């Protein structure tokens, strides 16, 4: 029997398999609390399925997930069919849930100026003793989708492959990019190769409809922006 076939009635599935298959077919939001716990414990005991056992455990705490999270290892192991490994799995799963609730939702930075780019990348490359080339990948609202290291070089330069830059842009669904690399010497004057690379990537972006917004040279205490200097 192929239980992965979504046309097969869920009611006819083996009860121990039902939560996993239901999640695959209908998604995580379709599962009850008991079914989610049943997935964590994997199996029940000789008298009851994982789902039935999970319902009994939840009933003992008035179906309050918060209260379940307060049960100790020993208290969970008092339920027939819950050994140490299963109790640990329940505790770990609920602890992750608790941490997720209290975790701050990360703010996606929006680029409004070259200073915003500097603030993001300076902590990463501003004080390095070798050159690194990075790209910020942005959406239509100029929010950063990804920041990616493209290459690592020596004290005097690094090689950049345009194919890598734009392959990543297509993977991330970016509509624009910002280039950046550091100068370990502290000089903020763009070299001839910096200028040529900027023009090369600008032209390459035009062929795939991905706009190059800026290219920054970053040092520990300052930066140079091609866009600010009117080089775009």
Image (spheres, rainbow, N blue to C red):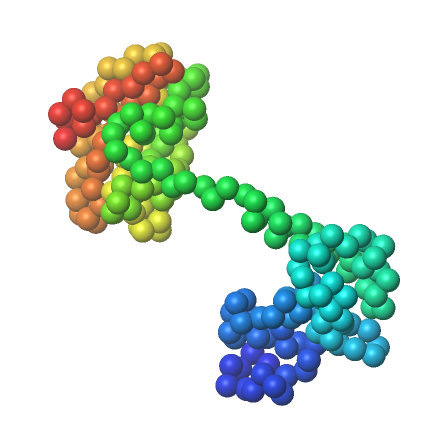
Q: From the viewer's perspective, is 80 left or right of 131?
A: right
Image-based side of 140 in relation to 127, left or right: left
Height in image: 105 above or below 6? above
Q: Is residue 161 visible?
A: no
Q: Is residue 139 above or below residue 14?
A: above
Quarter where residue 90 is shown: bottom right
Residue 176 visible, this angle: yes
Residue at (41, 40) in percent of width and height: 107
* Image coords of residue 29 (percent x, y): 52, 67
Left or right of 112? Residue 144 is right
Question: Residue 181 at what x, y percent from top left?
Answer: 33, 26
Residue 8: which quarter of the image?
Answer: bottom right
Farthest residue to the front: give it: 62
In the rendered view, tell whether residue 7 sits above or below residue 93. Answer: below
The one of 84 and 152 positioned closer to us in this rendering? 84
Q: Percent from the top left, x then y, of residue 186?
A: 34, 12
The quarter in which the C terminus is drawn is top left
User: Which residue appears at 74% of the width and 63% of the height?
Assistant: 61
Q: In the image, what residue occupies the spot 77% across and 55% down? A: 71
Would you identify the image quadrant in which residue 76 lies? Answer: bottom right
């Amino acid at each position: 029997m192929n239980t992965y076939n979504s046309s097969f009635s869920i009611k006819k599935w083996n009860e121990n398999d039902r939560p996993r298959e239901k999640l695959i077919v209908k998604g995580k939001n379709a599962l009850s609390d008991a079914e989610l716990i049943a997935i964590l414990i994997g199996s029940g005991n000789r008298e009851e399925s994982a789902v039935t056992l999970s319902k009994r455990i939840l009933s003992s705490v008035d179906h309050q997930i918060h209260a379940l999270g307060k049960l100790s290892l020993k208290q969970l192991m008092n339920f027939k069919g819950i050994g140490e490994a299963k109790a640990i799995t329940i505790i770990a799963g609920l602890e992750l849930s608790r941490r997720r609730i209290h975790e701050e939702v990360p703010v996606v930075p929006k680029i409004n100026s070259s200073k915003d780019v500097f603030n993001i990348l300076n902590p990463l490359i501003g004080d390095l003793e070798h050159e690194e080339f990075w790209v910020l990948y942005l959406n239509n609202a100029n929010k950063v989708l990804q920041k990616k290291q493209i290459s690592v070089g020596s004290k005097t330069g690094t090689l950049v492959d345009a194919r890598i830059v734009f392959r990543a842009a297509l993977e991330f669904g970016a509509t624009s990019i910002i280039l950046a690399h550091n100068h370990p010497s502290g000089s903020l004057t763009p070299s001839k190769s910096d200028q040529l690379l900027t023009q090369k990537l600008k032209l390459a972006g035009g062929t795939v409809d991905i706009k190059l917004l800026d290219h920054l040279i970053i040092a520990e205490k300052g930066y140079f922006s091609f866009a600010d200097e009117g080089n775009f």
